[in-house]
Image: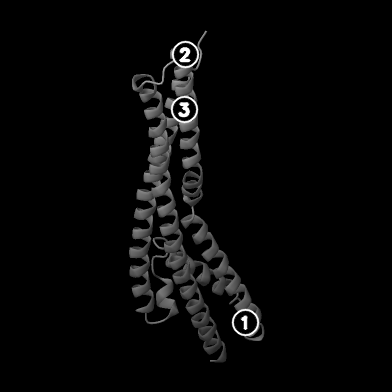
Amino acid sequence: MFQLTSSDIVQATLWTLIGFSVITWAIIFAKSWTLWRMGRANNSYGQAFWGAADLAAAASLDHSSSALGRIAEVGFGAVRDTRGDAMRALHLSGDIQLVLERSLRQQVSRERKDLEQGLSMLASVGSTAPFVGLFGTVWGIMHALQDISQAKSASLDVVAGPIGEALIATAIGIAAAIPAVLAYNYFLRRIKLCEAELEYFATDFLNLAVKTAHRSNGG
């Protein structure tokens, strides 16, 4: 019958921590690429949007390749839905503004949720990896004490292997936790900056759309 030994448990702990580290670095590279691509796409769309002659020209742009574009697309859709009747639009301009504001806010929230994917894993690794490593350390020391008891000797050749294995578990746990914590804090700040950029654009779009609607209805 197969029996787990203390060494097997410590080895399983080490492989678990290595898996945590691999997942952490995979998320770091993927999230870095996503944020870089998003920033580039937003800059490109922002230049095209604000360089357009009017909202009608801006509505013909490609909206699907950037977060700003998707926000604008939702805004244009809300404007089209509330423009069925010119007199109604003029009379209920306040209601139209609320509908447009709500639509833009919901799209900003969706974009933020997409950006936050993976952050919970980084937070989990950063908070649990040191304790997983500590578990391996404690188990390894218990194994070393058992070897001392059986050998009735505390010589270096008896305790060096188990204690060294235990200390490696602690080291790998810390090595897995530090990048996860640093990456979490960095990406959280980047996402907040991206969210602020999206909210600024949504506010500018809202003001521009409302002013354009008033001018159109007034004419």
| Residue 74 sits above or below residue 143 on the image | below
The residue drawn where x is 64% and y is 85% is 87
Q: Residues within 10 Å of mark 1 (few under 14, many from 20)?
A: some
Q: Nearer the viewer, residue 22 or 134?
A: 134
Secondary structure, mark 3, is helix
Q: Select label 3 or label 1 by which is in front.
A: 3
Q: Amino acid at mark 1?
A: Ala
User: Rounded to the nearest whole Å, what is the CA distance between mark 3 and mark 2?
Assistant: 14 Å
Q: Select label 1 or label 2 by which is in front.
A: 2
The residue drawn where x is 54% and y is 69% is 104
Q: Earlier in the sequence, mark 3 or mark 1?
A: 1
Please name the residue that numbered disc 2 is placed on: 150
Taking 111 as reference, is 103 left or right? right
The residue drawn where x is 42% and y is 30% is 166
Please name the residue that numbered disc 3 is placed on: 141
Q: Are marks 1 and 2 in contact (CB under 8 Å)?
A: no
Secondary structure, mark 1, is helix
User: Rounded to the nearest whole Å, what is the CA distance between mark 1 and mark 2?
Assistant: 88 Å
User: Rounded to the nearest whole Å, what is the CA distance between mark 3 and mark 1?
Assistant: 75 Å
| Residue 1 sits above or below residue 111 on the image | above
The residue drawn where x is 38% and y is 67% is 42
Per the rendering, the mark at residue 89 is 1
Image location (x, y in percent) of residue 10: 45, 26
Image location (x, y in percent) of residue 3: 51, 13
Query: Looking at the image, which residue sits at the far top?
Result: 1
Q: Hey, which quadrant is residue 65 in on the image?
A: bottom left
Q: Nearer the viewer, residue 80 or 30?
A: 30
| Residue 14 sits above or below residue 198 on the image | above
